């Protein structure tokens, strides 16, 4: 049975292979244009910086060098129920230098389209066992991010050999570039 997390809560993952599913719904009529939300992952070392540029996983770089993190690709609309984007993670293959994986969702061309996360609803991140499809945990963003164009949904981190997930839910309005500048 999945654990529903609140902001700031942490939970063990306890699965060597799991999938991160991200979902959202948008109010397409609020700006007249379609929304394109993008999931990105930053594979960080002990110093909280990217191991290398190839450890930044997003729609233009779908796999980590060791193939331990594989992004399903860009969903341009968010239409339909369930996960809009998925990332498979295999901890048995992950580079031992990776100590944290930060999961960020941004709105593509948010400024030009005059869009923000206040126009996004039913946002969630969930982790499920890749082999059994059993949901391990879920975190639903219930805050109103009325000016933010990027949200850190959560982070997966290694402490004393155990991988855990922390529900973060922190937004900012400077888009993906801001996160890139933080983690490079």
Image: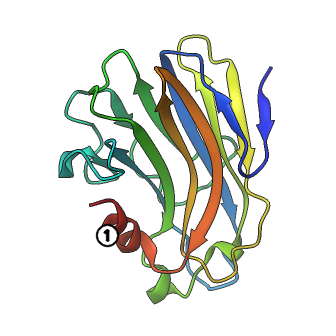
Q: Position of residue 125 (x, y in %)?
A: 64, 44
Classify the position of the N terminus by image quarter.
Answer: top right
Query: Which residue shows up at 27% across the image and 32% down it?
Result: 97
| Camera-nearest residue between 146 and 11 | 11
Check disc 1 and report its element: helix, strand or loop.
helix
The residue at which mark 1 appears reads as: 181
Q: Is residue 23 left or right of residue 60?
A: right
Q: Quadrant of residue 60?
A: bottom left
Q: Position of residue 179 (x, y in %)?
A: 40, 66
Query: Which residue shows up at 32% across the image and 26% down it?
Result: 68
Q: Is residue 97 left or right of residue 165?
A: left
Q: Position of residue 74 (x, y in %)?
A: 41, 52
Q: Is residue 148 above or below residue 65?
A: below
Total marks placed: 1
Classify the position of the C terminus by image quarter.
Answer: bottom left
Residue furthest to the top in view is: 132
């Amino acid at each position: 049975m999945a654990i529903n997390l609140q902001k700031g809560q942490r939970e063990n993952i306890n699965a060597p292979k799991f999938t991160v599913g991200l979902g959202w719904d948008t109010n397409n009529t609020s700006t007249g244009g379609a929304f394109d939300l993008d999931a990105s992952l930053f594979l960080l070392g002990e110093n909280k910086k990217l191991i290398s540029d190839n450890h930044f996983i997003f729609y233009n770089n779908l796999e980590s060098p060791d193939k331990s993190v594989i992004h399903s690709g860009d969903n341009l609309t968010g239409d339909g129920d369930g996960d809009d984007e998925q990332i498979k993670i295999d901890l048995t293959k992950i580079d031992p230098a990776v100590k944290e994986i930060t999961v960020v969702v941004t709105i593509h061309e948010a400024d030009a389209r005059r869009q923000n996360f206040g126009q996004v609803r039913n946002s969630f991140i969930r982790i499920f066992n890749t082999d059994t499809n059993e949901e391990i945990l879920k975190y639903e963003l219930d805050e109103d991010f009325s000016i933010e164009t990027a949200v850190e949904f959560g982070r997966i981190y290694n402490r004393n050999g155990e991988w855990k997930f922390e529900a973060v839910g922190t937004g900012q309005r400077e888009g993906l570039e801001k996160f890139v500048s933080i983690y490079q």
